[in-house]
Image: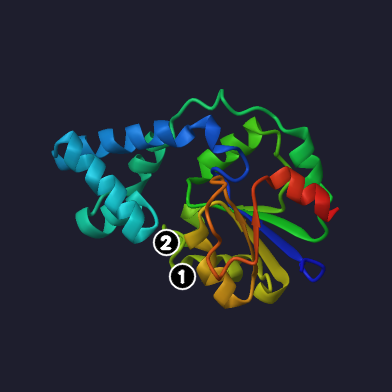
Amino acid sequence: MFSHVETWIFDLDNTLYHPSARLFDQINVRMTAFIIRELGVTRAEADRLRRTYWQRHGTTLRGLIDHHGIAPEQFLDEVHDIDLSALKPDVDLATAIRRLPGTKVVHTNGARSHAAKVLAARGLEGVFDAVYAIEDKALVPKPQADAYDRIIGLSGLEPTRAAMVEDDARNLEVPKGLGMTTVWLCHQAAAAAPPYVDRRITGLTRFLQELA
């Protein structure tokens, strides 16, 4: 299934670290506070908008830009100003990724600065050939098709010779349609894979080690 792969695309958050680090608990609190201050709404309404925009647009930021004209720079700086002490270097994961044949890249809906800090905290600096963040996609997030088209254009990758690893299954439907091999890192043991997932895994390092 993977012998043809020349480019490995990895999501960042909750993929290159386990969600038990609970970084999104911090990010969500900061997003809600930002919405309360900038839009002048109640906490309950801010939480509703944060969730709704994430579900409809792929990121809360995209919804705030489209519906409220929010400037993205301050939002990205504020919501990613979090404590990363729960993240530890992972030598086994770094080794497994390095051993993969071909090009390795990160494709995240997070900010460029956030990606750099997370990779450093996980001991993954220098492991990837490129890191594509939300700024590299003109703030267009996964799962919107244009986000993937932009990454393909920037990287020059051939979709039919690429594999994408992602913890959010909805972000794999467009890549599958483009011809990519899709790998869903599922953190819920009982969850069934949707039809556009080629491989469902529950542990990233173990999966990569088995490939080697």
Give SS at disc 2: loop
**Image height of 146 relative to 53, above or below:** below
Disc 1, disc 2: CB below 8 Å? yes
The residue depicted at 23 percent of the width and 45 percent of the height is 48
**Image height of 46 relative to 185, above or below:** above
Where does the image place residue 115, in percent across and percent down from the top left? 56, 42
Is 103 positioned to the left or the right of 182 in the image?
right
Asked whether residue 78 is in view, the answer is yes
Residue type, mark 1 in image:
Asp
**How far, Cα to Cα, is label 1 from label 2?**
7 Å
Which residue position is annotated with label 1?
146
Give the position of the N terminus as an image quadrant.
bottom right
Q: Which mark is residue 140?
A: 2
Residue type, mark 2 in image:
Val
Where does the image place residue 100, in percent across and percent down from the top left? 81, 54
Is 102 positioned to the left or the right of 31 in the image?
right
* Mark 1 crowdedness (10 Å alpha carbons): few <14, some 14-19, many ≥20: some
Asked whether residue 38 is in view, the answer is no
In which image quadrant can residue 130 be found? bottom right
